[in-house]
């Protein structure tokens, strides 16, 4: 009697596992990129239950076990890099490595009116750079109160859940708000001057996610990431890309971004640092990201306490310590990646004149 139960459960898990392999930007397909950890846990649970409760003594039950085991291995392939089972992609910073840059990024949730927790975290951790997204005039008034710590700012308050603010202790050069793909989705691009005079290029992003309430397809999000990835690869200075990318670290799109940009992910070999959903412990994945060029090594990376948003803030401190990262760190572009990147841009309607350079 248990065989049909395990067969149906395994079929559902197999479909959910295979959906992301479809080369489509449709939201209902791309959505299966997100819960890989949850699907892995479910597959292991079903597999363990079958091994305990049912004899594996015929071709049908053996096939169910094999399919479920395949789901476990496939999901694990994507998420194991974001555990301590892998060697870190980014080296730990030497104790004497300087200069350093500390960045705090937070999706504040525009409808969250309680600004005090984030302001308190900034005053406690004293980042050099604060990136806040989903910010409106209410949040701008609160964050402007941090100008004693972070006197330089780039502001873009909006009421559409895509406002963005950049505050920094470091002088800003060539700071611009750009609309790379959609007229109501801003991104911020600037060069930061470190204490020793070195300069770092910063791209802050918050593209629209594929979802039934936001966008039918991931096309515009993917195109924005490709445009910024190309700019990062061509930059003359060290580069940091940060923000709520509305994509998980292990998705095909994020892997494509890493191939196009050549940037490194400090989470690899250290942990997932799941920042969303702050109120649903069983349904969390890494949506808030920081990628950087190989010029940097990692001092520390922390998910900070909840601030009333549906995202946790994340704090990352980097050191300019070239030569310490493994030579094979990162993902290299190949012919397929270049074709996929061009297809992403061609499928959208990017504002080529606004593309960062």
Image (spheres, rainbow, N blue to C red):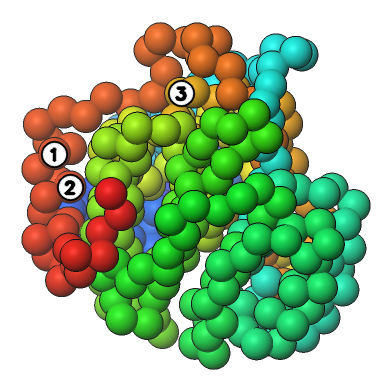
Residue with the mark numbered 2: 341
Quick check: 73 left or right of 105? left
Percent of width and height locating residue 216: 28, 77
- Residue 25 picture quarter: bottom left
Residue with the mark numbered 1: 338
Residue with the mark numbered 3: 294
Q: Closer to the N terminus: mark 1 or mark 3?
A: 3
Q: Residue at x 65, y 87 (%)?
A: 137
Q: Residue 179, can we see it? A: yes
Percent of width and height locating residue 134: 58, 76
State which mark lies toward you, 2 or 3.
3
Residue at mark 1 to residue at mark 3: CA–CA distance: 21 Å
State which mark lies toward you, 1 or 3.
3
Q: Residue at x 29, y 76 (%)?
A: 182
Residue contact between numbered discs 2 and 3, judged by CB atoms under 8 Å: no
- Residue 271 picture quarter: top right
Q: Closer to the N terminus: mark 2 or mark 3?
A: 3
Quick check: 31 left or right of 323? left
Quick check: 175 left or right of 58? right
Percent of width and height locating residue 78: 42, 35
- Residue 297 picture quarter: top right
Residue contact between numbered discs 1 and 3, judged by CB atoms under 8 Å: no
Residue contact between numbered discs 1 and 2, judged by CB atoms under 8 Å: yes
Relative to 84, is 227 above or below?
below
């Amino acid at each position: 009697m248990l065989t049909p139960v395990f067969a149906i459960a395994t079929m559902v898990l197999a479909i959910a596992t295979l959906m992301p392999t479809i080369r489509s930007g449709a939201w209902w397909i791309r959505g299966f990129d997100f819960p890989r950890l949850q699907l892995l846990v479910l597959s292991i649970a079903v597999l363990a239950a079958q091994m305990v409760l049912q004899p594996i003594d015929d071709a049908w039950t053996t096939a169910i076990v094999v399919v479920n085991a395949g789901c476990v291995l496939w999901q694990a392939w994507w998420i194991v890099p974001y555990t301590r089972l892998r060697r870190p992609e980014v080296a730990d910073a030497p104790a004497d490595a300087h200069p350093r840059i500390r960045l705090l990024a937070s999706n504040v949730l525009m409808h969250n009116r309680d600004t005090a927790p984030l302001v308190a975290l900034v005053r406690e951790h004293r980042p050099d750079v604060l990136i806040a997204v989903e910010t409106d005039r209410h949040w701008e008034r609160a964050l402007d109160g941090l100008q004693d710590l972070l006197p330089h700012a780039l502001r873009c308050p909006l009421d559409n859940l895509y406002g963005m603010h950049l505050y920094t202790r470091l002088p800003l050069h060539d700071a611009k708000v750009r609309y790379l793909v959609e007229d109501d989705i801003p991104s911020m691009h600037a060069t930061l001057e470190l204490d020793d005079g070195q300069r770092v290029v910063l791209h802050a992003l918050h593209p629209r996610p594929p979802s039934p309430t936001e966008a039918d397809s991931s096309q515009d999000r993917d195109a924005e990431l490709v445009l910024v990835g190309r700019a990062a690869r061509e930059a003359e200075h060290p580069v940091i890309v940060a923000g709520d990318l509305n994509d998980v670290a292990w998705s095909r799109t994020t892997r494509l971004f890493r191939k196009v940009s050549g940037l490194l992910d400090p989470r690899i070999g250290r942990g997932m640092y799941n920042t969303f959903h702050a109120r649903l412990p069983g349904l969390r994945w890494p949506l808030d990201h920081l990628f950087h060029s190989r010029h940097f090594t990692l001092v520390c990376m922390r998910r900070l306490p909840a601030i009333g948003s549906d995202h946790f803030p994340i704090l990352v401190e980097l050191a300019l310590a070239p030569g310490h990262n493994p030579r094979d760190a990162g993902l290299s572009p190949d012919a397929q990646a270049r074709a996929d990147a061009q297809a992403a841009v061609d499928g959208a309607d990017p504002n080529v004149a606004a593309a960062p350079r």
